[in-house]
Every structure is written in C-alpha cells, then in structure tokens.
C-alpha cells in the first residue's frame, strides 16, 4: 500500500506560457480538497528550490487565477540546480546545488514535487527523480515539441494569437499590395507556424522540418501576382532555415539550459523575397505576444485536467512520470520518454499533406 503523501511542492520552470495558472490552481485545489495534502509553492522555478524561496498555498491563494496568463509563482529558463550559476572573484562558475535542493525539501517536509515545464525543466526533474526525489511532471510549452503527449497546454493559445495576427496582416497586405512576413516562435519545431498558417490562410509556410528554397518561395509570390493576387502572407517559424544555410541565432545565454535564442529569419526571408520577386515586403516578429494573455478555453481545461492528474499521480505514488494527453484520456508516461527527443512535424504527416493540397508553398 502506498504511504499517504502529506505535503507536496509545486513549481513552474522555463518560459512562461498561457495556462500555467490553471495547472497551479488545479494542483492546489485537488491536492487539498481531494487528498488532504499541504501545498508549498516554490518561487521562480528551480531557483526557488535552491534558495529556499517559497510560499504556503491554500485554496484562497489560487482564487481568480484561472483566466490569467503567466504564473503567480514566477518562472525562469535559467538556474539549473545541477549547473547553478554563481560568481567567484568576478568570474561566472557553475556549481552542482542538487544537495542543497534535497536538503531544503527535507527541511520543509516535502514528500513529492510537481514540476510544470518543458523539455529543459522536465529533464532536470528526471535528474532529481534519479536522486530519489518523488517527482511528477506536467508538460508545458507553447512550442508543442514534447514527446509522449498529444499536445502541451499553452500551444492552443499561441496558435490562436498567431492566427489573429495573420488575420490582421491580411487586411493591410491587401490594401498596400505587399507581402507580409510573420515570424513566430517554436524553436526547432514548426507546429505554431504550420497550424496558425493553415488557420490564417497563409500562402507560404516555412518550418524547420523542411529546409526551404527561397527561389521557390519567390516563385510562389510571383505566380500569385501574375494571377492578379497582389498580396501574399508568409509565415516563418523562428527555426526555419534555407537548404544552403543555417538557423538564424539572435544571441546566446550561457547560463540557460538551452543557450541558443533564435530570431531574425523573418527579416532574412522578407529581404530575399523583395530582392527576388520585386514584391514590397514587411516583416512582423510576433515574439513574446505568443506567450502572454489569457489562455483559451482549451488550454484552461487541459491545464486543469493536467493539474488534477498530477495531484492524483502523487497520491498514487506514480513518480518519475509525466501526465500526458493521449486523447481522450490523461495518462502517465515515464519522464524519460517525454524528454528523450523533441516532437517535430513528421514530413509525411496528413497536416503537411493538407497544406500542400490547398496550394500552400512549404519552400
């Protein structure tokens, strides 16, 4: 028989994401109301574990947060406890602070930890599980690139935000007879670009999974113009790259789990289109707008289901696992299965076939 868990911790790690508060709310309410547990919230992701920065949480502390974007606990995509950045004599050094984390958890009497995050945060969670910490993961990323789940919460909201932007760009593109290039997030996967491009009626969609030929893109723009369609919409994933080139790196963050920050491919594509086709181009980088704002109903519901499932998993002793949507059910999968590789768009997928079949150029 599984020993009842009396006190748990919860944290949000990595980039912020619509629906985080829905998960926190569900974890806290179900842990307290269903399983009579105490809940401690760690502030600013794993940094809170290292520095012992926390707050006790009760039902009143999560009242009204369901529709709010961001995370009431704060987050960071840095501060890996296994390579924690400190400064010694003015020099940056990385120290393994995992022993400090374990000591802090012990001193607080925390018997299990719910980690809400993407591949970086869940990789750290898995390392702690290997050290004997009872961990349950919740899949979070707007990029939808986590393996072992049909979809991550936050993705639906990001697609809705990008689609709304495409809708708005259509009107100004048509008015001025321009090519509008929209650069969206997604890191090394093209899910946001592909789904928002389909939903928004884009003419060209460029994704990391298919290196593009800029001549084919320019040819598509020219064909549209010759057919009397004097504007075009191009959606570019930040990780897209040409067949003879590489991804565009905006800058790097040495202390981050994933130090590469992509950005700038939209400007390159826009300039190339203008040079090759003669079509006047404008570039919009959607950026962190995709992370912000109120989550869609889908993400509120999925986040709530994930949070409830995480509390249930703790109660049932299902540790070193991640809660996963495998429609129509929420199930548990090993953490290692969720993080072993990024989930990218299969090049033989029906969604790519659908895009090609309606005339969208994929480069």
Image (tube, rainbow, N blue to C red):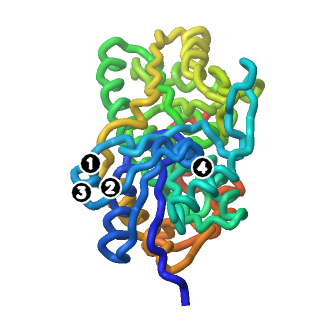
Q: Which residue is mark 1?
A: 67
Figure check: 287 above or below 102: above
Q: How many marks?
A: 4
Mark 1, other Cα within 10 Å: few <14 / some 14–19 / many ≥20? some
Marks 4 and 1, the one that precedes in the sequence: 1
Marks 4 and 2, the one that precedes in the sequence: 4
29 displayed left or right of 360? left
- Residue 240: % across, % down: 63, 32
Q: Which residue is mark 2?
A: 300
- The residue depicted at 36 percent of the width and 44 percent of the height is 72
Question: What element does badge 2 sit on?
Answer: helix
Figure check: 259 above or below 67: above
- The residue depicted at 74 percent of the width and 25 percent of the height is 88
Label at residue 121: 4
Question: What element does badge 3 sit on?
Answer: helix
94 displayed left or right of 138? right
Q: Which residue is mark 3?
A: 60
* Disc 2 and disc 1 in contact, CB within 8 angstroms: yes
* Disc 2 and disc 3 in contact, CB within 8 angstroms: no
- Nearer the observer, 232 or 229: 232
- Residue 77: % across, % down: 57, 38
Marks 2 and 1, the one that precedes in the sequence: 1
- The residue depicted at 66 percent of the width and 45 percent of the height is 81
Q: Is residue 206 visible?
A: yes
Marks 2 and 3, the one that precedes in the sequence: 3
State the CA–CA distance, disc 1 to disc 3. Answer: 16 Å
Question: What element does badge 1 sit on?
Answer: loop
């Amino acid at each position: 028989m599984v020993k009842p868990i009396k006190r748990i911790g919860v944290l949000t790690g990595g980039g912020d994401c619509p629906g985080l508060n829905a998960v926190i709310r569900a974890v806290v309410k179900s842990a307290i109301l269903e399983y009579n547990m105490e809940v401690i919230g760690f502030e600013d992701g794993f940094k809170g574990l290292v520095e012992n920065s926390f707050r006790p949480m009760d039902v009143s502390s999560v009242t009204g947060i369901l529709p709010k974007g961001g995370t009431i606990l704060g987050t960071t995509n840095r501060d890996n406890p296994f390579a924690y950045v400190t400064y010694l004599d003015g020099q940056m050094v990385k120290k393994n602070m995992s022993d400090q984390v374990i000591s802090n958890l012990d001193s607080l009497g925390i018997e299990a930890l719910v980690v809400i995050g993407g591949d970086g945060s869940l990789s750290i969670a898995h390392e702690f599980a290997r050290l004997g910490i009872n961990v349950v993961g919740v899949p979070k990323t707007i990029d939808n690139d986590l393996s072992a789940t049909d979809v991550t919460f936050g993705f639906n909201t990001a697609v809705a935000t990008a689609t709304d932007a495409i809708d708005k760009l259509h009107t100004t593109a048509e008015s001025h007879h321009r090519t509008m290039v929209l650069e969206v997030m997604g890191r090394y996967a093209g899910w946001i670009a592909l789904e928002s491009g389909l939903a928004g009626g884009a003419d060209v969609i460029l994704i990391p999974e298919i290196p593009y030929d800029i001549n084919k893109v320019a040819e598509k723009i020219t064909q549209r113009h010759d057919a009397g369609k004097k504007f075009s919409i191009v959606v570019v994933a930040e990780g897209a790259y040409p067949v003879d080139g590489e991804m565009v790196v905006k800058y790097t963050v040495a202390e981050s789990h994933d130090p590469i920050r992509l950005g700038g491919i939209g400007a390159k594509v826009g300039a190339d289109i203008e040079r090759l086709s003669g079509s006047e181009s404008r570039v919009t980088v959607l950026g962190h707008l995709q992370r912000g704002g109120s989550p869609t109903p889908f993400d509120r519901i999925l986040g709530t289901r994930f949070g409830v499932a995480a509390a249930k998993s703790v109660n049932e002793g299902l540790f070193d696992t991640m809660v996963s949507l495998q429609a129509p059910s929420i199930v548990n999968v090993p953490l290692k299965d969720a993080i072993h590789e990024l989930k990218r768009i299969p090049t033989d997928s029906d969604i790519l076939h659908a895009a090609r079949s309606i005339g969208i150029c994929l480069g």
